[in-house]
Amino acid sequence: MAQKPKGDAVTRKQRRLYFVLLGMLALGAATALVLTAVGDGMVYFYTPGDLQTKHVGPDRRVRLGGLVQKGSVIKDGSHVSFIVTDLTATVAVSYTGVLPDLFREGQGVVAEGKLDGQGTFQASEVLAKHDENYMPKEVADALKKSGHWQDEYQHK
Amino acid sequence: MIPEIGHYTLILALFVAIVQATVPLIGAARDDRPWMEVGRTAALAQFLLVAISFGALTWSYVTSDFSVSNVFENSHTDKPMLYKISGVWGNHEGSMLLWVFILAVYGMALASFGRNLPPALRARALAVQAMVSVGFLAFIIFTSDPFTRLDPAPLNGKGLNPLLQDPGLAFHPPFLYLGYVGFSMAFSFAIAALIEGRVDAAWARWVRPWTLVAWCFLTLGIAMGSWWAYYTLGWGGWWYWDPTENASFMPWLAGTALLHSAIVVEKRDTLKAWTILLAIFAFSLSLLGTFIVRSGIVTSVHSFAADPTRGTFILGLLVLVIGGSLMLFAFRAPSLKAGGLFTPLSREGALLLNNVLMSTACGTVLLGTLYPMFADALNLGKVSVGPPFFNAVFVPLMIPMVATMALGPMMSWRRGDLGGALSRLKLAFLMALVAGMASWLLHGGSVKDLEAAGGLALAAWLFVGTLVEWAERIKLFQGPLAESFDRARRLPRAAYGMSITHAALAVVIVGITGSAAWTTEKIQVMHPGETVSLAGYDLTLNGVEDGIKGPNYTASRASFTARKGGAWVADMSPEKRLYTMPPRPTTDAAIHTNFISDLYAVVGDADGKGGYVTRLYHNTLVPWIFIGAVIMVFGGMVSLTDRRHRIGAPSRKRNV
């Protein structure tokens, strides 16, 4: 047992104990917060092919990445629909809002949103990556994996 | 010829750095003054050499020397001069050179201003600085040479990413780096103290001003980056918890914690090991931040595969710096005897709580930032961790911290009186209640407005609490006003610095709360002549003019008129620009601010039927975020002018 010195102060051991207790309390609180936040804070990335093979429920928020199929973009006022392809499968995307500056046909895109009952991807966000290249990294990796990667996609 | 001189001096700098990293260290161990003095000379030589090298690269950019590959890749003759210069650090190689240059500037400052530092401590700190230098110089020379030549030289360059062609982003990297690299000072002193096995109040007095300088620059750098994202990306937001943003925010959190724990070391001679650890973390996170932004290690581990040497080098450097310093810490920290004892309810206790919460928050940000990379490496699938995660984790950790911020300064050292402090803060509590209730009732008193009411109450608590503490210090209304005035004049600048920065944080919190709760947004197709009402304003699209020529872009410019109740408020002209080199579109939002809220207009594509997609925002209180950040930096600068903080002023004698 640590001895209490005379006066008001606390011994080193006790202070260390406070330190450790405080640290554990903070860590515990942080862990609890992280665990509760993980559900809606973490969004998985899928390609159109993944969306077909892996079953993704309609309530799950996901990121969809691929190329915007040439000739598929239909603009109707502020509503836009287009098709995202990974050159093996396609998914129709519907979005209302202003498209990012770098959005164009034949280029890579990442959309965040949910699948609806009809298999259309309702995007709540189409991401503007302020990257030095047009191609989002996730899309480039997916294309490389499926063997459809061409160097011409990588514009500078 | 000039690029070759730059390359040559850079290599010379590496050799000088190697000398600076070893000779003073041996000298300090042997207590050999001439050997220790080598550190100072070497630091000055290194500064000159790296400055010449940096100047050579800048010269190549200014004169558009496209025979230099780096200039060809990132510049163009049409670019305005400002962006030719900022192009120097708008790319990987050049930004690394800027990093080393700033490191050399700090090294020179340490060599020339640190006259009354104990020679051994200064020699060791300079040696540690030089070790970092060696790592970075070798990295540049072996993997990221900015001076590589092209033969034959191309006629013109590829141009700079138009998003980077903006005054806000032109100066953002230098400020950020001044902050990142500034933490190398605290780091060098921490390692030097570990080698000596001695940390005392004087040590903390040397470390504090340097950390404060770094903190001010970093705060400004982050605010500039956020402001840039706000007005150029056209999305109406100011923070997205993007890895690049987190990269700069983590060292800020660690650095803020370090500033506060250094106070405890200085005043109470305790929390030494913890302070050293924070210094190591602040700098390690700065290194991580540098690499996250410039090498994209977070977006994908595969970018390592694209350039394996660079990736391996970076990993090696991180492991060496972080692992090496933590190992030294593990060996030496137990020998750091803590002095002053304190009860949990004391100012030390409050500062410790602040530190623990800051570090935990920093840890959760680190987890969220690095998790996608680990998940990818372990084949757990590709994930992104977005704002919902960070908001849900970070905000709850900050609430108790801000609540303690008003309380801490009211407590005395060693043993505080919580009840007494709380009763002295009655006014702050009352104002918090009033602010929270008022905002809640004014906005209709629904459940969803409760969060905003809480945010405002917290801000009021902090703001009024800070004022009360200041008023007590000068005994305002407790005696003649002349006496209070006299006290106010004699109050140390550092105390003013604290009051100003704490109050500024309250301003920032108001801004964050307001922007999260009351921002309104409308997206629609508008035809010329059409009017949209938003948050009490009527915005009329007068027309869109195409083909406006800029120096290196053509723009479509929309013209809006904002009216309130029929009265003219502002003309706003957002643009959509298409840059010529590289051919890329950008958005230029138009913002009208009355310093309480912003009207924010973005024009999008034409719908082909005479209409344009437009996005209009009314961003409540967002200006307060940036105003608050600037006041915060001002507070830091006021604190720096404190007599006790003047760099080099403290001496060890006073401590005995």
Image (tube, coloured by chain):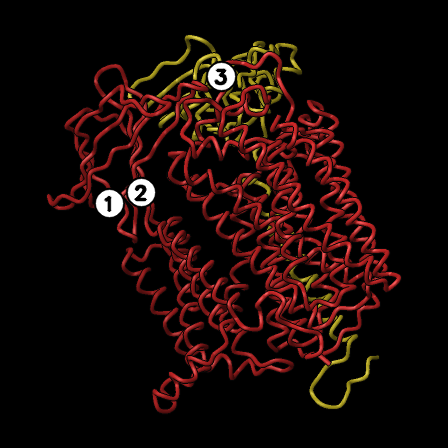
Chain colours: A yellow, B red
Say whether disc 2 or disc 1 marks the residue closer to the N-terminus. Answer: 2
Give the amino acid type for the residue marked by disc 2 in the picture.
Thr
* Mark 2, secondary structure of its residue: strand
Horizontally, residue B640 falls left or right of residue B187, namely: left
Q: From this view, report whether residue B433 is shown above or below residue B577.
A: below
Residue B577 in picture, x, y percent from top left: 35, 24
Which residue is under mark 1?
B535
Which residue is under mark 2?
B520
Query: Marks 2 and 1, how far apart in space?
Result: 7 Å
Q: From this view, report whether residue B624 is shown above or below residue A118.
A: below
Identify the image quadrant of residue A139.
Answer: top right
Q: From this view, report whether residue B457 is shown above or below residue B43.
A: below
Which residue is under mark 3?
B156
What crowding class fits label 3: few (fewer than 14 Cα within 10 Å), some (14-19), or many (20 or more)? some
To which chain does the residue with label 2 belong?
B
**Front label number (3 vs 1):** 3
| Tag 2 and tag 3, C-beta contact below 8 Å | no
Say whether disc 3 or disc 1 marks the residue closer to the N-terminus. Answer: 3
Identify the image quadrant of residue B18.
Answer: top right
Query: Marks 3 and 1, how far apart in space?
Result: 48 Å
Quadrant location of the N terminus of chain B? top right
* Mark 3, secondary structure of its residue: loop
Identify the image quadrant of residue B427.
Answer: bottom left
* A12 or B188, nearer to the observer: B188
Say whether disc 2 or disc 3 marks the residue closer to the N-terminus. Answer: 3
Q: Are marks 3 and 1 on the same chain?
A: yes
What residue do we see at 26% from left, 27% from top? B557
